[in-house]
Image: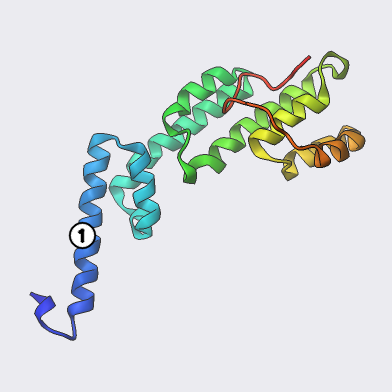
Amino acid sequence: QLIIFSNYENLAKEYLTNIDAKIKLQEMIEKDDVKNIYQHIVKHNFLQYDEGFLKYNQIFLDAVDKAYICVDKKDIQKGVKFIQKYIGIKTLKPKIDNIFKFGYIRQIDEAEVGSYDIIKSISIYKKLFGLDEHIKEFLKDKGFKKELETLRELDVDMDVKPYPDSILTI
């Protein structure tokens, strides 16, 4: 009804768009259409506070917590299983990456340096996440400054599956 009044036309159209977006979100949640739900939230930012989405997103956050516990116990493969359906969703990637960055740096830290190829292992890390501050700081702390410089110049051209069980190579 408000659309017929020129003073309220824009406001009414905005309300209709928001209502339509909320209905579509609910339909996607009912279908568990994970990828489209998070894309929809990016497109309609106001929905990130929607009660239905908050409940739905809590399932993701619980999966992240479970994956982190697995990675902390050195079971990366099991951690991947908890978050498998979320892999490939652009907006969730940073949160998921942080879980595995922790696990891979820990793998490198706990392994005997002579038992694996540090350059190749960090190259895998670089292919997955880039040379981020986490790995740079770790390498500096461990005295791998020369290796860090080599890695900065090295163009990593290898096929690496997302979140492998280990990045340590012989």
Left or right: 114 in relation to 93:
right
Q: Is residue 138 above or below residue 170?
A: below
Residue at left 81%, top 36%? Answer: 151
Q: How many marks?
A: 1
Question: For this rendering, which residue is in front, 105 or 65?
Answer: 105
Q: Is residue 168 above or below residue 41?
A: above
Residue at left 59%, top 17%? Answer: 75
Query: Image quadrant of residue 9?
Result: bottom left
Neighbour tally class for label 1: few under 14, some 14-19, many 20 plus, Cα within 10 Å = few
Query: Image quadrant of residue 164?
Result: top right
In the rendered image, residue 100, in percent from the top left (x then y), is placed at 61, 30
Q: Is residue 39 above or below residue 138?
A: below
- Identify the image quadrant of the C terminus: top right
Q: Amino acid at mark 1?
A: Ile
Q: Residue furthest bottom?
A: 7
Residue 140 visible in the shown view: no
Left or right: 66 in relation to 129:
left
Residue at left 12%, top 83%? Answer: 5
Question: For this rendering, which residue is in front, 46 or 160?
Answer: 160
Q: Is residue 105 above or below residue 4?
A: above
Question: For this rendering, which residue is in front, 156 or 5?
Answer: 156
In the rendered image, residue 105, in percent from the top left (x then y), is placed at 73, 29
In the rendered image, residue 45, in percent from the top left (x then y), is placed at 38, 58
- Residue at the spot of label 1: 19
Left or right: 6 in relation to 87:
left
In the rendered image, residue 135, in percent from the top left (x then y), is placed at 76, 37
Residue 156 visible in the shown view: yes
Q: Secondary structure at mark 1?
A: helix
